[in-house]
Amino acid sequence: MQTERLAFLINYLINENSELQSIEIPEQDTERKHLLRSLMNIRPPKAVSKEFLEVQDAYLQEECIRKGVISLSDISMVKPRIYLWQGDITRLSADAIVNAANSALLGCFIPCHGCIDNAIHSAAGVELRLECSRIMEKQRTKETTGKAKITKAYNLPCRYILHTVGPIIYGEVTPKDCELLSDCYRSCLELAAAYQLKSIAFCCISTGEFHFPNEKAAKIAIQTVQDYQKKNQNNLEVIFNVFKDSDYQIYKQLLG
């Protein structure tokens, strides 16, 4: 069934764009999955058929099940209401996961790029870019660094996605950069509380593509969360999600 769904989705995306007609569809499912993700990544936010969405949603939800869903009960608490988990954030069934977005807030358009923005949009489906596009059309300006927006999660196991734009580092990290990164975490926490969410999973905002030093970013993340928890007794549980071994070691050490 997944093979048939995969073929349908690829053909639909190729046929809706005259510039893609020359693409050869590979025979192996692994390569086809790579092609589907690439086609989804480059697709602009535009109308899509109900049939496509039905097939896409069934396909992505099955892929989600195959990857394995991780719930809060599967993760050990390292501090009161704070958890640390290493793995693919798109597997987490928290109330919300945080996406490190760019100021356009439309996801990553680079085919199969390794950023978390790409991973989240690819696993959620094309509906996510469409919702983000509606938000940005209404806003009529780029997303401000340090703020946060909320969307549905579509085919992810979480309920919502919180999108935040972290500071991009050019050279030395300034006090303003640190303040903006702290704002990202605080904005997400406040937005989660406003929606009465019980759990939120943070990625390592601004590290990687945005070049914020990992250890300094982790210190800011932990301090901001702990300060928020002291001031707000709303029982919001926080998961620090890391992907790299080096980030896991940093958070493990800082959290004791």
Image (cartoon, grey):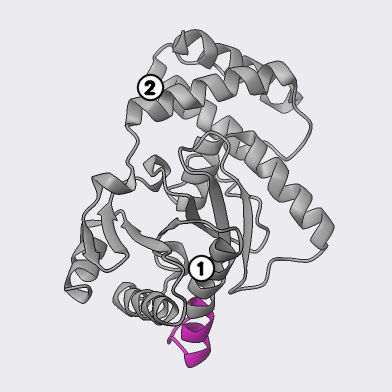
In the picture as drawn, the residue positioned furthest to the bottom comes out as 175
In the rendered view, would you say 18 is above or below 3?
A: below
Task: Name the residue that disc number 1 marks.
Answer: 189
Question: Label 2: few (<14), some or many (≥20) within 10 Å?
Answer: few
Q: Tag 2: residue type? A: Thr
Q: Is any part of residue 167 visible from this angle?
A: no
Is residue 74 inside the magenta stretch?
no
Q: Nearer the viewer, residue 207 or 195?
A: 195
User: Image check: 17 left or right of 113?
Assistant: right
Q: Is any part of residue 27 visible from this angle?
A: yes
Is residue 173 inside the magenta stretch?
yes
Q: Residue at x 51, y 85 (%)?
A: 179
Query: Are circles 2 and 1 on residues that touch, CB within 8 Å?
Result: no
**Element assignment for label 2:** helix
Q: Tag 1: residue type? A: Leu
Task: Name the residue that disc number 2 marks.
Answer: 30
Residue 173 placement: quadrant: bottom left
The image position of residue 134, as x and y in percent, is 78, 49
User: Image check: 112 left or right of 245?
Assistant: right
Quarter of the figure that contains the C terminus:
bottom left
Task: Write down the region rendered in magenta.
Answer: 167-181
In the rendered view, would you say 62 is above or below 231?
A: above
Q: Nearer the viewer, residue 178 or 64?
A: 64
Query: Between disc 2 and disc 1, whose residue precedes?
Result: 2
Q: Nearer the viewer, mark 2 or mark 1?
A: 1
Q: Nearer the viewer, residue 178 or 223?
A: 223
The image position of residue 151, as x and y in percent, is 63, 50
Q: Residue at x 41, y 30 (%)?
A: 64
